Amino acid sequence: MAEAEFDRALNRLKENRVRLTPQRKIILNYLITHHTHPTVEMILDDLQKHDDSISLATVYNTVKLLVNYNFVIELKNGDGSTHYDYFGHPHYHVVCDNCGKITDVMDDEFYDIAKELARVTRKNTNYLVTRSDVEVHGICPDCQYKLGLNGNKEELN
């Protein structure tokens, strides 16, 4: 599935006459295959283990390019950092207000929820909605356990 998604993204970038350097392809593939919501620095650290020719500027510029083409979304974390997520399959995020962990929530109903959100927004503001980034906040199961907010850890999983 990741390979098909990679090919689809490459084709769309080619259609838009985006220069596809080896570094851009590596960064795109990384974002498609890693669901860890990395920062630019995390991407750089991981990729430099295999290719030390990739620079911070290259990662930053490539991620911004992918954001501009709506392949990647920016997620602001509670600690002030910006994390990135490949958005090939629409989903939403839940963010832990205690530790900052970001988790993808895949749900078949998300498309309908986003469509309804766009409809209501259009009705109330006359905006033409081009995308929705939905974020839910709470306390993750690990932090609930650490903070004594819920039963034992085994019950949470």
Image (cartoon, grey):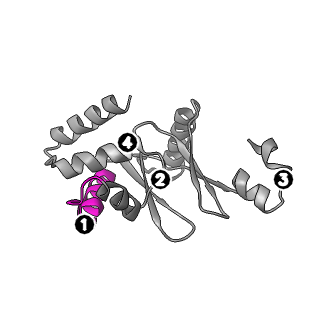
Which residue corresponds to the image point at 52% horizontal and 34% vertical from the top-left?
Answer: 111
Task: Tell me the residue that label 1 is attached to.
Answer: 57
The magenta segment: 50-68
Task: Tell me the residue that label 2 is attached to.
Answer: 37
**Front in this rendered view, residue 137 or 153:** 153
Nearer-N-terminus badge (4/1): 4
Nearer-N-terminus badge (3/4): 4
Nearer-N-terminus badge (4/2): 4
Mark 1 → mark 3, Cα distance in angstroms: 43 Å
For residue 59, what is the image quadrant?
bottom left
Query: Where does residue 106 sit, x and y in percent of width and height?
Result: 56, 36
Are there few (<14), some (14-19), or many (20+) residues within 10 Å of tag 3? some
Are there few (<14), some (14-19), or many (20+) residues within 10 Å of tag 4? many
Query: Where does residue 131 sit, x and y in percent of width and height?
Result: 43, 46
Nearer-N-terminus badge (2/3): 2
Query: Where does residue 109 sit, x and y in percent of width and height?
Result: 59, 32
Task: Tell me the residue that label 3 is attached to.
Answer: 150
Q: Secondary structure at mark 2?
A: loop
Nearer-N-terminus badge (1/2): 2
Give, as a three-letter code, the residue at label 2: His
Mark 1 → mark 2, Cα distance in angstroms: 19 Å
Give, as a three-letter code, the residue at label 3: Asn
Q: Secondary structure at mark 3?
A: loop
Mark 4 → mark 1, Cα distance in angstroms: 20 Å
